[in-house]
């Protein structure tokens, strides 16, 4: 009975010692992976990055630090990982330009992923039939793309939640970019199958974005600083006095002052002739499934004592194709 008790106690002691050592080595492995990934991306700099040039290595499948070449960013990452207590034979670094990125939700010009896999010998637990354990850790770092911001679509509020809000199958197409100034974590809010597509341009975003369902932003947003209103140097159009309210009945709209705003719903759609549309309260609202078109139009959101100010709301499944004038209104 005493012998059995001693074996049981040795097993408990072995588990405590070996598990504690394994936890310590796990912390060491994570610190090494963190420093290796960060060093590998810092070493590439912030200029134009070209695989195989200036010491920039692209190897998305991973390169063992045992064979990393001197003078490369991968070697720099390996050295930092080794300094933090991991043998080069136990460290692998994968890296590439924006393609094949393991990162989600962020746009990168270059990324590096460091992976540690260390076999750790056991001591007391050997009496229980266990000889080794494997400690693993990984970390990914990236060169984040950034820009001065700008585009064709500007959302200027600097703190609003859902500053740009899309639902259902909303599809925002802007070939010259989108700028969202809000620093809120959910500055862009998308649900269902909503899409933002800027082609070769970007969505410049100060804060963050939130998505559910299959919502997408293509390409992914890039970090931006707040930009000023691109029309701040312009004088607002002179509003009519007294106000003469235009008919809110579509589907064909002409320039004028719309008391209570404009709402396009149903399947009929609408067409806007070129010119200035003043929303005297009520906002500019498009819903339904009909096509809405207009070339050379300006929408000015305003209000008075009788009409409450509202913004722009576009939803439904219809196609909305509106363009601004090519000269100042």
Image (cartoon, grey):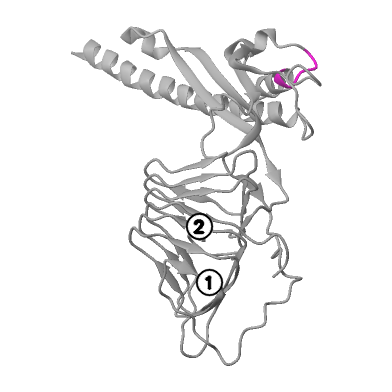
Relative horizontal placement of residue 232, taking residue 246 as reference (left or right): right
- Residue 147 visible? The answer is yes
Where does the image place residue 70, in percent across and percent down from the top left? Answer: 78, 13
- Residue 85 visible? The answer is no
* Nearest to N terminus: mark 2 or mark 1: 1
State the extent of the magenta-drawn residues as a range.
Answer: 70-74
Where does the image place residue 275, in percent across and percent down from the top left? Answer: 61, 69
Q: In what quadrant of the picture does the C terminus appear?
A: bottom right
The foreground one among 44 and 132 is 44
**Alpha-carbon span between mark 2 and mark 1:** 12 Å
The foreground one among 194 and 12 is 194
Residue at the spot 42% in from the left edge and 66% down from the top edge: 251
Residue 127, relative to residue 230: is it above or below? above
The foreground one among 236 and 27 is 236
Q: Quadrant of residue 327?
A: bottom right
Is disc 2 surrounded by few (<14), some (14 to 19) or many (20+) residues within 10 Å? some
Q: Secondary structure at mark 2?
A: strand
Residue at the spot 43% in from the left edge and 43% down from the top edge: 215
Residue 78, relative to residue 166: is it above or below? above
Relative horizontal placement of residue 221, taking residue 266 as reference (left or right): right
The foreground one among 1 and 292 is 292
The residue identified by callout 2 is 293
Q: In what quadrant of the picture does the N terminus appear?
A: top left
Which numbered tag is attached to residue 254?
1
Relative horizontal placement of residue 45, taking residue 259 as reference (left or right): right
Main secondary structure type of the part rendered in magenta: loop
Where does the image place residue 171, in percent across and percent down from the top left? Answer: 47, 48
Residue at the spot 33% in from the left edge and 61% down from the top edge: 266
Residue 300, relative to residue 58: is it above or below? below
Task: Inspect the magenta stretch and tell me whether residue 318 lies in it.
Answer: no
């Amino acid at each position: 009975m005493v012998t059995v008790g001693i074996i049981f106690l040795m097993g408990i002691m072995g588990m405590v010692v070996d598990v504690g050592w394994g936890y310590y080595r796990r912390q060491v492995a994570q610190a090494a992976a963190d420093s290796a990934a960060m060093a590998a991306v810092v070493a590439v700099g912030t200029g134009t990055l070209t695989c195989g040039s200036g010491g920039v290595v692209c190897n998305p499948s991973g390169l063992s630090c045992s064979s990393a070449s001197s003078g490369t960013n991968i070697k720099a990452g390996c050295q930092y990982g080794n300094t933090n207590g991991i043998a080069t034979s136990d460290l692998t670094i994968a890296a590439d330009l924006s393609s094949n990125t393991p990162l989600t939700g962020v746009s990168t010009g270059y990324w590096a992923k460091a992976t540690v896999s260390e076999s750790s010998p056991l001591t007391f637990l050997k009496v229980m039939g266990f000889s080794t354990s494997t400690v693993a850790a990984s970390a990914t770092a990236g060169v984040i793309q950034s820009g001065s911001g700008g585009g064709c679509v500007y959302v200027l509020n600097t703190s609003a939640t859902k500053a740009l809000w899309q639902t259902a199958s909303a599809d925002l197409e802007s070939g010259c970019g989108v700028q969202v100034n809000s620093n809120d974590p959910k500055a862009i809010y998308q649900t269902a199958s909503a899409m933002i597509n800027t082609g070769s341009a970007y969505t410049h975003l100060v804060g963050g974005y939130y998505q559910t369902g299959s919502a997408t932003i293509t390409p992914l947003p890039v970090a931006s600083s707040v930009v000023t209103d691109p029309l701040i140097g312009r004088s607002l159009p002179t509003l009519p006095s007294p106000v003469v309210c235009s008919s809110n009945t579509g589907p064909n709209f002409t320039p004028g002052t719309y008391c209570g705003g404009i709402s396009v719903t149903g399947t009929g759609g609408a067409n806007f002739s070129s010119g200035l549309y003043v929303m005297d309260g009520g906002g500019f609202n498009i819903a339904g499934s009909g096509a809405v078109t207009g070339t050379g139009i300006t929408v000015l959101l305003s209000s008075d004592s009788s009409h409450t100010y509202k913004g722009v709301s576009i939803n439904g499944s219809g196609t909305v194709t509106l363009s601004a004038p090519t000269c100042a209104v």
